[in-house]
Image (spheres, rainbow, N blue to C red):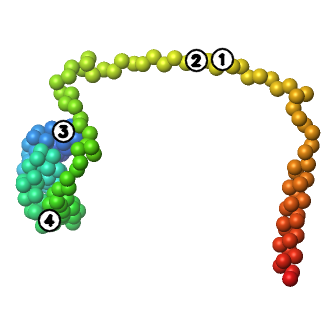
Amino acid sequence: MNLEKFDQEFNLGKLAIERGQYQLSIAHLKNAIDLVSPLSKKGGEAQIWLVSAYQANGMIEEAIALCQELIRHPSFKVKKQAGDLLYIMKAPRLERPKEWLTEIPDLSKVSESETKIPAKKISVTPIKKPLEDIDLSQVNSKDNHFVLVGFVVIIIIFGGLFFLNLT
């Protein structure tokens, strides 16, 4: 029974993170952790997700504290993930120039009808210039001996190379 409830709370917590509902995610993940041993593999995985929820919610101190606990977790995978997250969170923040950032407008107060983009009509114009038939009597089909000259040049080059190899 506890594992079913854990899976339900854990999945709801992950879903809430994906939707940007970090407070809700924290609540679900804490409920999930309470249903299993924190030292179990499932408990460790839920705590790693909780670190991410804390971090996304701006609760960096809580995220760091939990990571510091998790680097002593029995599961190697949980230890490694906690160490990686701790390293990232403790890294110095680099200053980014404003021109590197793109501002995303808040669309939460916009109604659904305002967010619909009207479809553009695409007009297709046919090609107006029809393809012309080529009059073969106008084409210059006189042999200009280009192929023959090319073969002669190739023979002279290979002959010269052959002659140089003999001497």
Disc 4 target residue:
71
Q: Is residue 79 above or below residue 57?
A: below
Where does the image place residue 2, in percent across and percent down from the top left? 12, 47
Compute the Cα span from label 1 to label 2: 8 Å
| Front label number (1 vs 3) | 1
Compute the Cα span from label 3 to label 2: 46 Å
Q: Are marks 1 and 3 in contact (CB under 8 Å)?
A: no
* Amino acid at pointer 1: Lys
Is 56 or 164 nearer to us in this picture?
A: 164
Q: Are marks 1 and 2 in contact (CB under 8 Å)?
A: yes
Residue sitting at x 82%, y 26%? 134
Disc 3 target residue:
20
* Amino acid at pointer 4: Ile
Task: Identify the mark nearer the N-term, 1 or 3.
Answer: 3
Compute the Cα span from label 1 to label 3: 53 Å
Q: Which mark is residue 128?
A: 1
Disc 4 crowd, CA 10 A, few/some/many (<14, 14-19, 20+): some
* Amino acid at pointer 3: Gly
Disc 1 crowd, CA 10 A, few/some/many (<14, 14-19, 20+): few
Mark 3 residue element: loop
Disc 2 target residue:
125
